[in-house]
Image: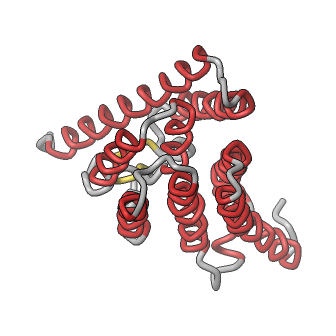
Amino acid sequence: MRPQPGRATVAAALVHLFTASGVVLALLMVHFAYAGQVRTVLGLYLLAMLIDGTDGLLARRFRVGEVLPQIDGALLDNIVDYITYAFAPMALLWANGYLPGGAAGLVWAAVPALASCYQFTRTDAKTDDHFFLGFPSYWNVVAFYVIVLGLTPAVTATLLAVLSVLVFVPIKYVYPSRTVTLWRTNMVLAALWLVLYAVITWQLPQPSPVLVALSLAYLVYYAAVSLWLTVRTRRLTAAPAA
């Protein structure tokens, strides 16, 4: 049974508010980044990922686009994701000495931020078959591992440069909550990774090496499946019709 028109409008507005609450988290991320409270910022990243992972499901459940067509939910989502997934992580790395010193720190923080500006404004950043096209600006995840693994500024700068280039490379990356192939497996593994993320963050500054290794194994799986599906999709597209 569908909710009454008035209730449907309220429900849709609340879903948008739920998405927009990520902006408040981003303000807190930057505030605590410059206060040197790294673990707090990583905890806020987790909250932002939980919101981002569930707001789309809620939007479809409550038919938000149909009930409130005057509000562009996709644009709202992109604004929030850019701030929480790209801008705030660069602030964290730059403010806490994980990037090279001096003006070079600004340069290396700006490179991913600029690359993500390009990606978040691409009309095909999310493909019709529900993939991300190009490295999907998971800079919060990158910042997490820079901190957990204790990477040097030089290694961090190199990693940021490589991933910034991959933003422009047309590889399809799994969209865990929407990619149809292996959907159940991807969702379960993504959920388990979030649990590992939470535990590792709680254990900082000395997380369990076993848990860190398990979390990295998921990243290897994610990259491997994304590459496999990219190749498979291209082969199917190139195959002549029977």
Q: Pick the residue in front: 126 or 113.
A: 113
- The total number of labels drawn is 0
Colour mode? secondary structure
Q: Pick the residue in front: 116 or 156.
A: 156
Residue 164 percent across, percent down from the top left: 33, 54
Q: Quadrant of residue 113?
A: bottom left
Left or right: 227 in relation to 1: left
Left or right: 31 in relation to 144: right
Judged from this view, the residue extending furthest toward the bottom is: 70
Residue 99 percent across, percent down from the top left: 44, 50
Residue 161 percent across, percent down from the top left: 31, 50
Left or right: 121 in relation to 150: left
| Image vertical order of residue 4 relative to residue 224, above or below | below
| Image vertical order of residue 63 relative to residue 96, above or below | below
Judged from this view, the residue extending furthest toward the top is: 210
For the point 59% across and 14% down, the residue is: 210
Left or right: 12 in relation to 100: right
Q: Pick the residue in front: 168 or 163.
A: 163
Residue 81 in view of the camera: yes
Residue 80 percent across, percent down from the top left: 60, 66
For the point 88% across and 73% down, the residue is: 7
Q: Which quadrant, please, contains the C terminus?
A: top left
Q: Which quadrant, please, contains the N terminus?
A: bottom right
For the point 26% across and 35% down, the residue is: 232
| Image vertical order of residue 210 relative to residue 157, above or below | above
Residue 60 in view of the camera: no
